[in-house]
Amino acid sequence: MAERLVTDRLILRSWEMEDVPAAFEVFGHADVARWLSPIMDRVPDVAAMQVLLRQWIVEDLRAEPPTGRWCVQRREDAAVIGGGTLLPLPPGGDDLEMGWQLHPNAWRQGYASEATYAMAQWAFSHDADELYAVVRPENARAVSTIRRNGMEWVGETGKYFGQPMQLYRLRPADLDQARPGALPPGFEPE
């Protein structure tokens, strides 16, 4: 089960069934769903979100650290703004992928970087030796977040989802060099 993580502005906690409406606002949003393919499709309605969220809650209860799923909640107003994941990548589950999905209203505020940093710290404290991010080549916002947190480009691969994706890797020493809230030269907030 994923541990509750608290940052300056966010709480990353387990999903609850009460989160269905807010989760649907994120995972049912076309601008979010376009970046989730081929991993998952846009959630079509609240009933489908309810089924999916129930599945995520059960999976998270069975998860062994450092894997997990988090609801990303803003501390100032308790608004659910998205989700975060640390999950094994297909086909064999040998590699661990870090991901996040935020509602477009939460973009360009540094929340993705803050959540990513917290999840990476947690994973490394549970003996993960490296994390990966698999990104569609045209997702510049995700690449900016990834690089801000110290991830390095490994190359292009079709290994995980059967289509060309950009692969980034993070090791503990890379994260140690990244500071929460710091922007490397040339980077804009996501």
Image (cartoon, rainbow, N blue to C red):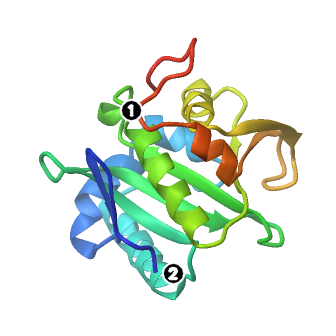
Mark closest to the chain's N terminus, 2 or 1: 2
- Percent of width and height locating residue 33: 50, 44
Q: Quadrant of residue 14?
A: bottom left
- Percent of width and height locating residue 51: 40, 74
Which residue is identified by label 1?
A: 110
Please say whether residue 115 is visible from this viewpoint: yes
- Percent of width and height locating residue 34: 55, 38
Q: Quadrant of residue 154?
A: top right
Q: How many marks?
A: 2
**Helix or strand or loop: what does disc 1 sit on?**
loop
Residue at the limit of the structure toward the top, as seen here:
186
| Residue 96 left/right relative to 142 | right
Residue at the limit of the structure toward the left, as seen here:
77
Q: Amino acid at mark 2?
A: Glu
- In this rendering, is residue 75 above or below 86? above
- Percent of width and height locating residue 173: 68, 48
Q: Foreground mark, 2 or 1?
A: 1
- In this rendering, is residue 5 above or below 34? below
Q: Amino acid at mark 1?
A: Gly
Residue drawn at 78 percent across, 54 percent down? 161
Residue at the limit of the structure toward the bottom, as seen here:
62
Please say whether residue 41 is visible from this viewpoint: no
Residue drawn at 62 percent across, 66 percent down? 87
**Helix or strand or loop: what does disc 2 sit on?**
helix
Which residue is identified by label 2?
A: 59
- In this rendering, is residue 62 above or below 49? below
